Structure formats: structure tokens, C-alpha cells
Image: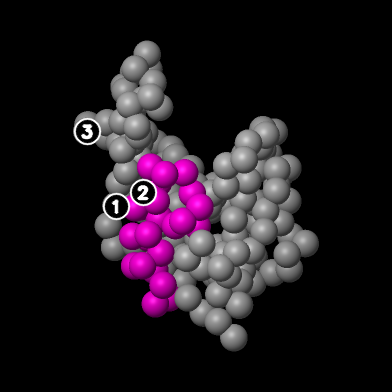
Amino acid sequence: MIDCDGYRLNVGIILSNDKGQVFWARRVGQDAWQFPQGGIDKEETPEQAMYRELKEETGLNPTDVDILGCTDDWLKYRLPKRYVRRNQTPVCIGQKQIWYMLRMLGSESSVDLSVCEKPEFDSWRWIDYWEPSKRVIFFKRKVYKRALKELEPLLVTS
């Protein structure tokens, strides 16, 4: 869904382990790494979209994670002009996201990147909490920093 301002409604997922590291995944066939994320379908709540995207992109089920919280409001980023697809209607100028902080409860062996017909990712690893804000594609860095900063107090470590 795209709102009246041209932002695609979306959820972002920060999946953490008990060491305070986060799940970092590589997009299929690219040297591009990111958190799981995806669009919110019509008639779907952000939480429902988060669970659907979690399953599609990581193979994890609701029983494999604990929701620690989410951002208080939408976080937005604009796409650079070269990434805007002007031939689509409505035109999408960026993403408007609710970010979720999850803690993995189950085993890492539960992760299955090939659970859906067209996988988003081909590899994953755990990385230090703040690394994604430095490594994600340039136009997503500010929104990653904002999400990580807001959700950091929820991080559970042992």
C-alpha cells in the first residue's frame, strides 16, 4: 500500500539474539545486506505484516520469537531519484515503516531463507547491534539509526 504522500507502508524487523547481536541478511545475488522488511498488505495490521514477512524472509514462526516492542510512530526514508519508478501508479517515493524489535527464542537451525518461492536473502549472520546503521545502503542509514536508537532500551542480553 502507498499512502497519499507516496510512501509505501512497510515493517522493519530487528531480530536479536541473547548476546545483543542482530540478524543481518544478504539480498539474493547482491552484495547488499539489510534487516528483514516488507510491505503491509491491504487489510493487514503492521504486526500481521511483520509476522508474514518474518516467515517469508527467515522461515521463522511467531513461536520462534518474542516481540520486545516497536517504534512509537512511522519512520520514513525517501528513495534517491534514480530508484523511484515513475512508470508505476501510484508512484512510490520512499518507505514509511513501523520497526519491531524481536528476540529469537528458538534455535538458529529454524532459520530457513528458502521457505518462500522467491527468497529475498541467500545468506545471514549475527552482527553487532550498531553495525547495520553503518553498513546498510546509504539512503536507509538515517532510518536504521533512528530505529536502533529508539528500540535499543528493549534489547535483552544475557
Q: Judge whether 19 appears above or below 124 on screen.
A: below
Residue 43 x/y as whole percent: 39, 40
Q: Judge whether 115 appears above or below 111 on screen.
A: above
| Distance of label 2 from label 3 (alpha carbons) | 14 Å
Q: Look at label 3 and name its amino acid.
A: Asp
Whichever of labels 1 and 2 marks the residue nearer the N terminus, that label is: 1
Q: Look at label 1 and name its amino acid.
A: Trp
Q: Look at label 2 and name its amino acid.
A: Gln
Cβ atoms at labels 1 and 2 below 8 Å apart:
yes
| Distance of label 1 from label 2 (alpha carbons) | 5 Å
Question: How many circles with numbers are drawn on the protein?
Answer: 3
Whichever of labels 1 and 3 marks the residue nearer the N terminus, that label is: 3
State the image quarter where residue 151 is shown: bottom left
Q: Secondary structure at mark 3?
A: loop
Query: Which residue is at the far right?
Result: 109
Q: Which residue is mark 3?
A: 5
Whichever of labels 2 and 3 marks the residue nearer the N terminus, that label is: 3
Q: Predominant secondary structure in magenta?
A: helix
| Quadrant position of the N terminus in the picture | top left
Q: Which residue is mark 1?
A: 74
Can residue 112 be seen here? The reply is: yes
**Which numbered marker is on residue 97?**
2
Residue at the image position 56 percent from the left and 68 percent from the top: 128
Tell me the magenta residue range: 132-154
